[in-house]
Amino acid sequence: MSRLTVGPGITLFKALAGDAVLQAALAVIEASPPRKMLTPGGKAMSVAMTNCGPLGWVTDRDGYRYVSDDPSTGRPWPAMPAPMAELAAAAAEASSFPGFVPEACLVNLYDTESRMGAHQDRDERDRAAPIVSVSFGLSARFRIGGTSRGGPTLSFVLDHGDVLVFGGPARLAYHGVDRVLPGRHATLGAQRINLTFRRVT
Ligand code: MD3
Ligand code: FE
């Protein structure tokens, strides 16, 4: 494990997340399988998504929002497994955000064709809390800019086990996933999983 400051409010922990967190994420995926949600414009996203915790992020023709039940199962999202919440809290604390108790964990499942265009995460009322991101499986090229579109950007590769914390001046930064790097991961095959932990209310 190594800790790097990537920029103001951005801390990267290489290879911090271990197998307990990955196994917990796989159990969430089994309980509420990821699905390709529709954008408000009616197009299917290339990333399949599910959630765990009291709230989950969804998108459909009615827009982006947080809801307490999985629209696919009609039941509450799976509870957030303790190893996941504990890792997110530990990474936040080590990045000067003590007391981080996530309300939502969005689970993103990528194949080698999936992409996520540049966007801001602004569906959360709480902008004081950081967002913690955990990556597993295939590596991906991640890109981050400033708080307005079209400025300079920085890109770097996220590998299996990497944990990123975005807070303070980086909380509303534009960011996206340019591409998943080809290959096969030992346990996840040709897939990438990303977990993002958020405070919403
Ligand atoms: C920077 N996910 O789910 S995680 C997302 O790899 C999302 O699946 C990407 O962007 C993924 O919304 C990137 C890294 C990340 C997450 C949230 C951020 C970077 C962020 C919020 C503010 C600034
Ligand atoms: Fe995002």
Image (tube, grey):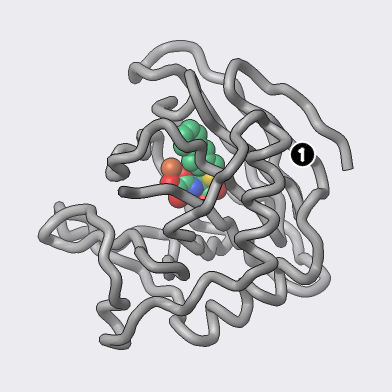
Q: Residue at x 70, y 59 (%)?
A: 136
Can residue 177 be seen from the camera position used here? no
Q: Is 50 rendered above or below residue 127?
A: below
Residue 64 appears at what percent x and percent y? 22, 53
Q: Mark 1, residues whose alpha carbon is within 10 Å: few (<14), some, or many (≥20)?
A: many
Foreground pick, 143 / 15:
15
Q: Is 169 rendered above or below residue 124?
A: above
Q: Which residue is drawn at 55% across and 46% down?
A: 100
Q: Residue at x 28, y 44 (%)?
A: 123
Going by the picture, which residue comes out furthest to the top?
A: 151
* Residue for badge 1: 13
Residue 133 appears at what percent x and percent y? 59, 47
Q: Is 176 rendered above or below residue 96?
A: below
Please identify the quarter of the rendering in which residue 83 is found: bottom right
Going by the picture, which residue comes out furthest to the right?
A: 1
Q: Is 148 rendered above or below residue 180?
A: above
Q: How many labels were placed on the picture? A: 1
- Mark 1 Cβ inside 8 Å of ligand 1: no
Q: What residue type is labelled 1?
A: Phe
Foreground pick, 84 / 5:
84
Q: Residue at x 35, y 49 (%)?
A: 200
Q: Quadrant of the N terminus?
A: top right
Residue 50 appears at what percent x and percent y? 43, 70
Q: SS class of the residue under badge 1?
A: strand
Q: Is 110 placed left or right of 96 in the picture? A: left
Q: Is 73 placed left or right of 161 in the picture? A: left
Residue 145 appears at what percent x and percent y? 48, 21
Can residue 149 be seen from the camera position used here? yes
Foreground pick, 33 / 139:
33
Going by the picture, which residue comes out furthest to the left?
A: 62
